[in-house]
């Protein structure tokens, strides 16, 4: 029996790389004579209803949903699936963004030929972790990478709003925008007070530089903030870094890249649990899988959840 593939794509992901990957994928499908449908987002967030509508329909075991895009695109599809009537709908994924942190953590291939070959020959469906969060204990949202507050979110917010981002992206130098705002964050991101509550203990930090609730080791396009985290351990990790001096920050970053020994520094804290509640007491920037939120004070409950990925 032949398969059928529905492709959900954000063509502008990865500075337009997703459109290139889409065209390559379509050529492979045509050569293999595989039936396919393409649904491309035309405005920010549209992949959420597209994915929800897909999951609400009946599909045979020979029909597959394939996402082409970056971490933000995958986040939207996951939220659409999880809020549908069939929240266990499996998702196949070709990473084509700039960061691709979830694909890195899940060891997913970015090769369209390899992905299509797997879908054509009895693909494996695997249950993996994701995080979910709520601010009102009613409306849950989902993330595959992390929810950051403070330093990393400052960089995301400033970069996403930069008038130079599109210009630099067009000439392949988009990451320079992030580097420039990293330097800005070092000077402008202040320390702030937070409390973290788990089922067994309450933690308080008065000198927080950033707090990231993460589902796996990576953030920021491959930075291994917590090497021990993984998408199969059924827990979330709240990583807190207290504000160091500029010299100390540079040393921490070198250790992170060199041998991962940053986790032993007294400025670094890791809290692991299935459920975590975080409160901030001053307005700060937030980011969810690379998409920024408005500056605000947060009261967020996080829990571990799961979804089906197609390998």
Image (cartoon, helix red, strand yellow):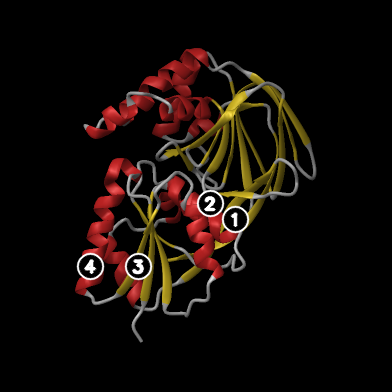
Q: Quick one: label 4 or label 1, which is nearer the N terminus?
A: 4
> Do residues under tags 1 and 2 come within 8 Å of each other at their CB atoms?
yes
Q: From the top left corner, tell me how far across and down residue 184 is, in percent.
A: 44, 16
Label 3 sits on residue: 37
Instruction: Give the mark nearer the N terminus: 3 vs 1.
Output: 3
Query: Alpha-carbon distance for marks 2 and 3?
Result: 33 Å
Q: Is any atom of residue 278 visible in this view?
A: yes
Of the numbered discs 2 and 4, the one sitting upstream in the chain is 4
Separation of residues labelled 1 and 2 (CA atoms): 6 Å
Residue located 23% across and 67% down the image: 28
- Give the secondary structure at mark 3: strand
- Tell me which corner region of the image, top left, top right, bottom left or bottom right, holds residue 168: top left
Q: Which mark is residue 230?
A: 2
Q: Position of residue 219 (x, y in %)?
A: 47, 39
For residue 27, what is the image quadrant?
Answer: bottom left
Residue 58 position, x and y percent, is 52, 76
Which residue is painted at 44% across and 20% down in the image? 250
């Amino acid at each position: 029996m032949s398969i059928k593939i529905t492709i959900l794509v954000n063509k502008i992901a990865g500075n337009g790389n997703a459109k290139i990957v889409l065209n390559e994928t379509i050529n492979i499908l045509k050569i293999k004579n595989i039936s396919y449908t393409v649904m491309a987002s035309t405005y920010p967030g549209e992949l959420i209803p597209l994915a929800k509508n897909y999951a609400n329909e009946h599909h045979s075991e020979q029909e597959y949903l394939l996402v082409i895009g970056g971490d933000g695109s995958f986040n939207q599809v996951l939220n659409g699936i999880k809020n549908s009537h069939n929240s266990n709908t499996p998702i196949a994924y070709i990473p084509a963004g700039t960061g691709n942190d979830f694909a890195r953590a899940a060891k997913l291939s970015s090769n369209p030929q390899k992905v299509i070959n797997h879908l054509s020959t009895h693909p494996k469906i695997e249950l993996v972790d994701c995080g979910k969060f709520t601010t009102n204990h009613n409306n849950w949202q989902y993330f595959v990478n992390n929810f950051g507050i403070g330093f990393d979110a400052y960089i995301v917010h400033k970069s996403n709003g930069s008038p130079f981002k599109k210009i630099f992206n067009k000439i392949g130098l988009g990451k320079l925008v992030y580097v420039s705002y990293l330097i800005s964050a070092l000077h402008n991101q202040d320390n702030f007070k937070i409390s973290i509550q788990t089922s067994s203990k309450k933690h308080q930090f008065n000198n927080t530089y950033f707090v990231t609730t993460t589902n796996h080791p990576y953030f920021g396009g491959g930075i291994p903030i917590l090497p021990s985290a993984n998408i199969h351990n059924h827990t979330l990790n709240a990583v807190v870094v207290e504000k160091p001096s500029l010299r100390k920050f540079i040393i921490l970053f070198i250790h992170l890249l060199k041998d991962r020994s940053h986790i032993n520094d007294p400025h670094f804290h890791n809290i692991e649990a299935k459920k975590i509640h975080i409160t901030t007491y001053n307005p700060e920037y937030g980011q969810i899988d690379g998409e920024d939120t408005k500056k605000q004070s947060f009261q967020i409950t996080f829990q571990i959840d799961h979804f089906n990925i197609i390998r």
